[in-house]
Image (cartoon, rainbow, N blue to C red):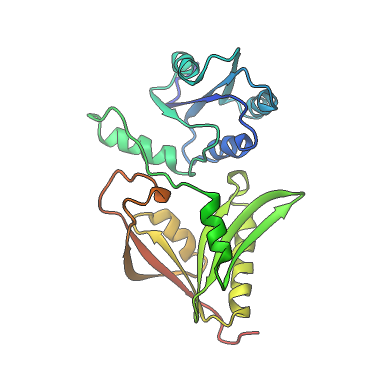
Amino acid sequence: MRTPVVSVVMAVYNGMPWLPQTLASLRSQTFDDFEVVLIDDGSTDDTAKILRATAEADARFGVITQTNQGLVASLNRGIAEARGTLIARLDSDDLAMPDRLAMQVDFMRRHPDVAVVGSAIRIIDAEGVAADIGKAGSVIVLAEQDGQLLACCHLENTGEVCYFGMFSVAPHLQGGGIGKQLMQEAERVALAWQCVAMEMTVIDIRDELIAFYERRGYARTGIKKPFPYGDARFGLPLRDDLRFEVLRKDLPGENP
């Protein structure tokens, strides 16, 4: 049996309701030479059912079921079962960005003297979302189907410009057109507000992400903003040169 480059080890105990999205984010990785070692640590909800269904649909996923032994013991068992050259960790209530494994593997290959690499995180908290919704001229746009959230974004009317942020699409639906439809709806709202342009901020080294927005009409402005170091909502960055760049898209001149 061929050895994968990466083994992702995940221990799960009663992983609902976030587990399906977490697993989908792994299946959506741009780097695909990996296995996922899933430890069901005696769950009493639908975790086992979801893990089995994922393993049946994707041969890269394997499930180990055991009585509840706790996180540390479960992870140690997962590492012992792993076959990859590199070990990656993901908790059952986290989402992995599509290029997470690709970027980390590339870094490890270019820095053979490094043993451990991490990444920045962004904390999604209910209080922050509630504060955004409560602002005047601020809305959250949702795409839903059968009660399931598919995608979302935050819009803020700042006068002539509509700020576009918190854009997220369920990993297993990325590339399927949902994001494009949501962005179109966001522009419709901005035009109804009589805004003349959309603006967003993106970390300026995220070339692939910036190219995605450029294909949808946004342009780099060259305007840079400081990264909020010290703000726990934006995680713990591992480099000190991060900056945001403002992207802008001019809207049609004739508003409804």
Q: Position of residue 44 (x, y in %)?
A: 68, 22
Nearer to the camera, 196 or 214: 196
Q: Identify whether 89 is placed above or below 130.
A: above
Q: Quadrant of the C terminus?
A: bottom right
Q: Position of residue 102 (x, y in %)?
A: 41, 39
Nearer to the camera, 210 or 33: 210
Residue located 53% across and 70% down the image: 156
Q: Is residue 133 visible?
A: yes
Q: Position of residue 45 (x, y in %)?
A: 69, 26
Q: Is residue 212 left or right of residue 194?
A: left
Q: Is residue 49 left or right of residue 62?
A: right
Q: Is residue 115 left or right of residue 165?
A: left
Residue 172 in which image quadrant: top right
Q: Is residue 167 visible?
A: no
Q: Identify whether 89 is placed above or below 256.
A: above
Residue located 38% across and 44% down the image: 120
Residue located 48% across and 18% down the image: 78
Q: Identify whether 209 is placed above or below 157.
A: above
